[in-house]
Amino acid sequence: MFLTRRAALAALAVTTALGLSPAFAQNAEKPKLTLGVGGKQLLYYLPLTVAEKKGFFKDQGLDVEINDFGGGAKSLQALVGGSVDVVTGAYEHTIRMQAKGQDIRAVIELGRFPAITIAVRKDLADKVKSAADFKGLKIGVTAPGSSTALTAQYAMVKAGLKATDAAIIGVGAGASAVAAIKQKQVDVISHLDPVTSKLESDGDIVSLIDTRTEAGTKALFGGSNPAAVLYLKNDFAEKNPVTTQKLVNALMKSLKWLETAKPQDVADLVPPEYHLGDKPLYLTAVKNSQESYSRTGIPTADAMKSMYDSLKLLDPELTNSNVDLTKTFIDSFAKKAAAGS
C-alpha cells in the first residue's frame, strides 16, 4: 500500500512533533547485522552492553548479533575480513588503517579516556617502579596489538625503552587475566576494569599508570585520548546511512543513561559473570570508570591529535605518516543523535 502525499506529510508532522527526524522513522537498510568487540565484559565497552541490555538497539529496529573476540586487534581483523559489519574498539585502529590506505572510520566516541591501568605484581614492586624498569619482563594484555598492549608499549618508549624490550602476552579479558597475575604468568599487567579493580582489591598489584581519569591520561599522553568508539568501513556508512544512524542513536542513548546511572544500576543490568565473583568490587570498578565515558560522543581535535602523536612515537611505520584525522571520524551521526534529529 502506497501513502498519499498528504498522508506522508502527516506522518512527517507526527515524527517532527515527537522530536524525531525522518531518519529515526525510516527502516534500516540492514536491520540484522553483526558487531565485533574484543572483551565485551570490560567496562571499556560498557556502553555497548547497556545498549544491548536496555534494548536500545531493538528500539531502533535493529537485530545486532555481538561477536566477542579475545581482544581489539582480533575484532579489527574480523571487520577487515568481512565477518562482522561494525566494531566497538579503540579509536587508534582508525588511524592505523587510514595510514595503510584502508578507509575505516569511527562514528561515535564511547570513551574519552583509555581507562587502562598499568600495574606491576606486588612482589616485584620494590624493583619495578616505572615503565623504565619493564625491560625483560612479561606484560599481560588483553591481546597483542590491542589498546592495552599499545598503551604499555607507549609507556615504555616514552620512558626510553624500545617497544620490543618486554614480552607482550595476551591474557584475555576476564578471569583469565586475573589468574595470569595471581599465578605469576606475567610480571606486569596493562588492563581495564573490572580486572584492574579486582587485582587492586586483592592486593595483587601496585598501579604505576592509571588512565581512568583525565589527570592520569594527561600524565601519560599529555592530553585526552579517544578510547572506545564504534568504527566501520566508510563504504558501509555510505551504503547504510540509516542503519549507521540507528546504531549511533542507540549508543548515544547508552552514554546519556550512564551520565546519571548509579554503580548499582550498572551492576544490576550487566550479566552476573561480569562481576568476577565480587559484586561490591564491581560497584567500585564502575565508580572508578565513570569519568572515562564520553559526554558528547565526539572526540575533540586535540584529543585525536594526541592519539596520533603517541602512535607516531610508538610505531616506526607511522612516524613519517600523514593521516588526515578528519577522515578517521565521521561526526555527523553523533551530532544528529545528540540533537535527537
Image (cartoon, rainbow, N blue to C red):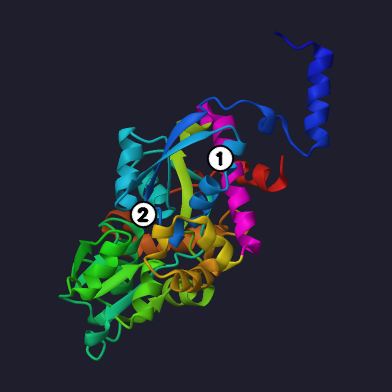
Task: Report the quarter where the N terminus lies.
Answer: top right
- Residue 62's spot in the image, x, y percent? 54, 33
Please say whether residue 248 is one of the residues in the magenta stretch: yes
- 48 up-or-down from 151: above or below: above
Please say whether residue 258 is one of the residues in the magenta stretch: yes
Q: Residue at x 83, y 28 (%)?
A: 13
Q: How far, Cα to Cα, is label 1 from label 2?
A: 19 Å
- Residue 72's spot in the image, x, y percent? 34, 52
Task: Report the quarter where the C terminus lies.
Answer: top right
Amino acid at dot 1: Phe
Q: Dot 2, crowdedness within 10 Å: few (<14), some or many (≥20)? A: many
Query: If you read the primary sequence from the N terminus, does the residue marked by circle 1 or circle 2 appear first?
Result: 2
- Residue 324's spot in the image, x, y percent? 47, 48
Nearer the observer, 177 or 319: 177
Residue 57 badge: 1
The secondary structure making up most of the magenta span is helix
Which residues are the magenta region?
238-261
Name of the residue lying farthest toward the bottom: 126
- Residue 198's spot in the image, x, y percent? 37, 73
Nearer the observer, 34 or 201: 201
| Residue occupied by mark 2 | 39
Name of the residue lying farthest toward the top: 1
Nearer the observer, 24 or 80: 24
Helix, strand or loop at mark 1 = helix
